[in-house]
Image (tube, helix red, strand yellow):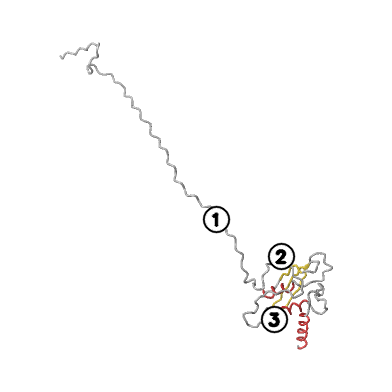
């Protein structure tokens, strides 16, 4: 048991002394150029030194590496602890790889196992961005991953203002309907009354006409 602990401590010390500007990782053995520090040792030392991540978790990671040995993307494919997963992205992006045989960007896969003890404080598993080590090449910004300042964690990032929906044009006030023009009714024509011939003796005789003789009473 003591030997095992000594090995863990010694590997952590070696990992802290790794200079990323001079040491690259072999994509076959996952060992740095110093010949003894593994990728897992380096990641574990950074987790313990710069984070408050704790608990048990296994995180299977996909790294996309271009022919220059630069890590273009880090994606956690498994894992439940967001503190571990986000910290892994910050730690692995500045790492450079031996990619002389890479003709195109290639994916590499690696599983990290964590068994860190929690301290029982409010800071346990609170993610804080990890800056690249001094002298390390600047990491390539991942596509679709917004950069956050050290004082602004993803939980504190200000949401972008949403564009306001265009307002519908104001309706014009309805105009009262125009009054209909009234056409005066046509004057009624006087009805023609048929002339009825007058009975004899009901009208006086006109000039020049002989008066009819009145019939004598019997």
Residue contact at pointers 3 and 2, CB within 8 angstroms: no
| Nearer mark to the viewer, of 3 and 2 | 2
Marks 1 and 3, the one that precedes in the sequence: 3
Q: Residue furthest bottom?
A: 2
Q: Secondary structure at mark 1?
A: loop
Q: CA distance from mark 3 to mark 2?
A: 31 Å
Q: Quadrant of the N terminus?
A: bottom right
Residue 176 at what x, y percent from top left? 44, 46
Residue 29 at what x, y percent from top left? 82, 75
Residue at horizontal 24 percent and vertical 12 percent from the top: 207
Which label sits on residue 167? 1
Give the residue at mark 2.
143
State the residue in front, 106 or 211. Answer: 106
How many numbered marks, from 0 up? 3
Residue at horizontal 68 percent and vertical 74 percent from the top: 129
Marks 2 and 1, the one that precedes in the sequence: 2
Residue at horizontal 20 percent and vertical 12 percent from the top: 213
Residue 208 at what x, y percent from top left? 25, 11
Q: CA distance from mark 1 to mark 3?
A: 55 Å
Give the residue at mark 3.
116
Which label sits on residue 57? none
Marks 3 and 2, the one that precedes in the sequence: 3
The crowd level at tag 3 (other Cα within 10 Å; few <14, some 14-19, many 20+) is: some
């Amino acid at each position: 048991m003591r030997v095992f602990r000594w090995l863990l401590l010694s590997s952590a010390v070696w990992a802290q002394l790794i200079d990323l500007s001079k040491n690259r990782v072999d994509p076959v053995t996952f060992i740095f150029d110093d010949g003894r520090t593994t990728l897992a040792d380096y990641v574990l030392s950074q987790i313990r030194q710069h984070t408050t991540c704790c608990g048990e978790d296994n995180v299977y990671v996909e790294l996309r590496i271009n022919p220059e040995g630069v890590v273009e993307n880090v994606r956690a494919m498994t894992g439940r602890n967001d503190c571990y997963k986000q910290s892994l992205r910050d730690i692995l992006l500045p790492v450079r790889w031996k990619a002389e045989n890479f003709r195109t960007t290639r994916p590499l896969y690696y599983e990290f196992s964590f068994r860190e003890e929690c301290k029982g404080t409010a800071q346990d598993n609170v993610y804080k961005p990890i800056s690249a080590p001094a002298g390390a090449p600047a990491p390539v910004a991942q596509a679709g991953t917004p950069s956050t300042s050290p004082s602004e964690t993803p939980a504190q990032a200000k949401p972008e203002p949403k564009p306001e929906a265009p307002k519908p044009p104001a309706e014009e006030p309805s105009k009262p309907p125009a009054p209909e023009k009234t056409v005066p009714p046509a004057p009624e024509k006087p009805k023609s009354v048929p002339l009825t011939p007058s009975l004899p003796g009901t009208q006086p005789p006109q000039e020049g006409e002989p008066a009819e003789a009145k019939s004598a009473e019997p």
